[in-house]
Image (cartoon, rainbow, N blue to C red):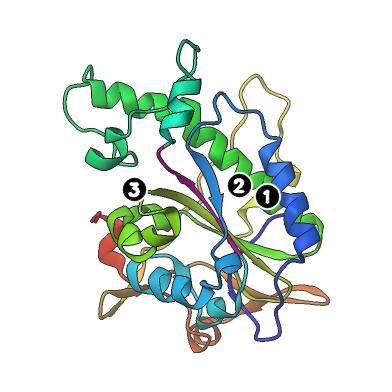
Amino acid sequence: MIYQTISFKKESTPPTEEHTELAIKNALKVPSAERFHMRIWFPHRAGLMDKWWDWHRGQTHHNMGDGIVNCKHLALWCMVPESQEVHRQAEGSIDTPLPDERFAEWDLLEKPKNDPDSDSRMMFQGLLTEYYSFMYMQAYEYARTLVQLGYHVGFSNCVGTNPKKFNKAFAGHFNNMPVIPLLAIYAGTKGEVIQHTKNRSLVDELDVSGEMVGMKNIPVPMHSHMGDNKAFVNVPYWTPTSNGLEPLTEDQAKALGVEKRNISTMSERE
């Protein structure tokens, strides 16, 4: 089972290059409608993990502990404009790249709120069906591969909340092209804190023989605001041991620095 790791121990080490390449290739084998624009960026290969976590902790509302900085491996799924050569090669084909101005003039992650028949709304729907859904599947396959190889992993969807700030910080590593960050997967050998509600354990006893199958939602308490634009997420926390997951008390989780920072970015985009 894939768990959401939000903090790592100091002795944690990143996936080997051999394992990383296997995860990349498994991810890229996921079926996809189109292959334009989709990229996986590895800041650790550019020696940027300290800068990455400074940005991630300072600009997103991802729930994490202080030990997140001990994670030295990250893969970011993002979209970038294609070169003019790629545009020329695609002429006359059924699939063509997006116009460059879509990246420069419109946030491709922002759902349009106006006319339901507008070009921008149709564009957003096309992105969901032709790009984003497949990128999420790639990321899941990447994480699944690393978990099977024995690593602890975590997902961050919050990286897409501040695309402009992301570009200000990292555009130089994309030849100063506008980048649309979507989802990050991070991994290491020694997880320290895992955020896990155990709702999925109910699946084992679930009757799945009917025409329509689903699970009832289990209520989660509201976040506890801590001041200074921070909050504590009231879900169960665990630490991995040789005997499985051991529960952490709220005080123990807080002592490990677990908190959601920059909570205003949950509703604001920059």
Query: Residue reaching furthest bottom?
Result: 255
The reply, left or right, for residue 85 in relation to residue 266 is right
| Residue annotated with mark 2 | 139
Exactly how many numbered labels are in the figure?
A: 3
Magenta segment includes 123? no
Q: Position of residue 217 (x, y in %)?
A: 50, 45
User: Relative to 4, does residue 113 appear above or below in the rendering?
Assistant: above
Residue located 26% across and 41% down the image = 104
Quadrant in the picture for the N terminus: bottom right
Q: Can the viewer see residue 125?
A: yes
- The residue nearer to you, when weighing 29 against 68, is 29
The reply, left or right, for residue 209 in relation to residue 120 is right
- Please state which amino acid type lies under the numbered disc 1: Tyr
Residue located 75% across and 63% down the image = 17
The circle drawn on residue 142 is 1
**How far, Cα to Cα, is label 2 from label 3?**
21 Å
- The residue nearer to you, when weighing 149 against 173, is 173
Which region shows up in magenta?
74-81
User: Relative to 167, does residue 88 appear above or below in the rendering?
Assistant: above
- The residue nearer to you, when weighing 203 against 126, is 126
- Please state which amino acid type lies under the numbered disc 3: Pro
Q: Secondary structure at mark 3?
A: loop
Q: Are marks 2 and 1 in contact (CB under 8 Å)?
A: yes
Q: Position of residue 61 (x, y in %)?
A: 37, 65
